[in-house]
Image (cartoon, grey):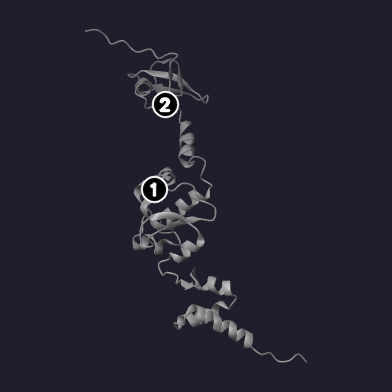
Amino acid sequence: MHRRTRRDLTGQKLGKWLVIERVLNHGFDAVCVHWLCRCDCGTQRVVQSSSLINGRSRSCGCRTPDIIRKRATVHGMSRTKTWAAWKDAKARCHTPTNAWYHSYGAIGVTMCDAWRCDFRNFLADMGVAPDGHSLDRIDPFGHYEPRNCRWADKRTQALNTRRGTPEYLVDGISFTTKELAKAYGVDDKALRRRLRLGEDPKHAVRMIQSHRRNRTYPATP
């Protein structure tokens, strides 16, 4: 029977390890071959031969913080509005301690697995958030997924709530109550009261304007 030749690793670079020399009779594991190695960071350690050869040991462990930072830093966008929108939406759906969980995750609203697991998938589908826009679900009862999400401005989002915001057509232009009051210079609360009674929007505006013009004030002493 021929004796198996030991592989000489001296001087080889395996991962971040540089093999310096073989170490004989290392501790209680004297049967296995061990090598004194120096990591790129300067740390020296005795490593078992099989761990070096099969790749189980690639460094002293100094790579771990690098890996964590790489995973945490998503292409330099971790401080952007786009990343914040993704993070907040995911928390609303999947973090029971989130302040808005009761209105999302608790009633079954979720984020699709592809987005939930990797921000890069969300970014590829949605792109960067435009100025003045935020993440909006087209179907307010649906989930956060590519076919049901868009970047929308505040007005679009306000009109797309589950409760819904009524719009009124005046002279061919669609207005919310607040927009209509502002456009015609009338009191928002007075207009809202008339509209709740079913009054025609244009007539309601004219009546408020007329009432304001005909209002009399006591003479100044």
| Total tally of numbered discs in the picture | 2
Check disc 2 and give the amino acid type.
Arg
Residue 211 in picture, x, y percent from top left: 59, 86
Q: 63 above or below 72?
A: above
Disc 1 packing (10 Å; few <14; some 14–19; many ≥20): some
The picture quadrant where one finds residue 11 is top left
The answer to whether the residues at label 1 and label 2 have Cβ atoms under 8 Å apart is: no
Q: 23 above or below 57?
A: above
Please give the name of the residue rendered at 47% of the width and 53% of the height, measured from the top-left corner.
Answer: 85
Check disc 1 and give the amino acid type.
Trp
The residue that label 1 is drawn on is 115
Please give the name of the residue rendered at 49% of the width and 47% of the height, measured from the top-left corner.
Answer: 128
Q: Nearer the viewer, residue 123 or 48?
A: 123
Residue 145 in picture, x, y percent from top left: 37, 52
Residue at the limit of the structure toward the front, as seen here: 171
Residue at the limit of the structure toward the top, as seen here: 2
Please give the name of the residue rendered at 46% of the width and 46% of the height, measured from the top-left corner.
Answer: 127
The residue that label 2 is drawn on is 58
Q: Nearer the viewer, residue 3 or 170?
A: 170
Residue 34 in picture, x, y percent from top left: 39, 19
Indicate the quadrant containing the N terminus: top left, top right, bottom left or bottom right. top left
Q: Is residue 142 left or right of residue 219?
A: left
Indicate the quadrant containing the C terminus: top left, top right, bottom left or bottom right. bottom right
Residue at the limit of the structure toward the left, as seen here: 1
Q: Is residue 25 left or right of residue 216?
A: left
Which label's residue is closer to the chain start, 1 or 2? Answer: 2
Q: Nearer the viewer, residue 64 or 121?
A: 121
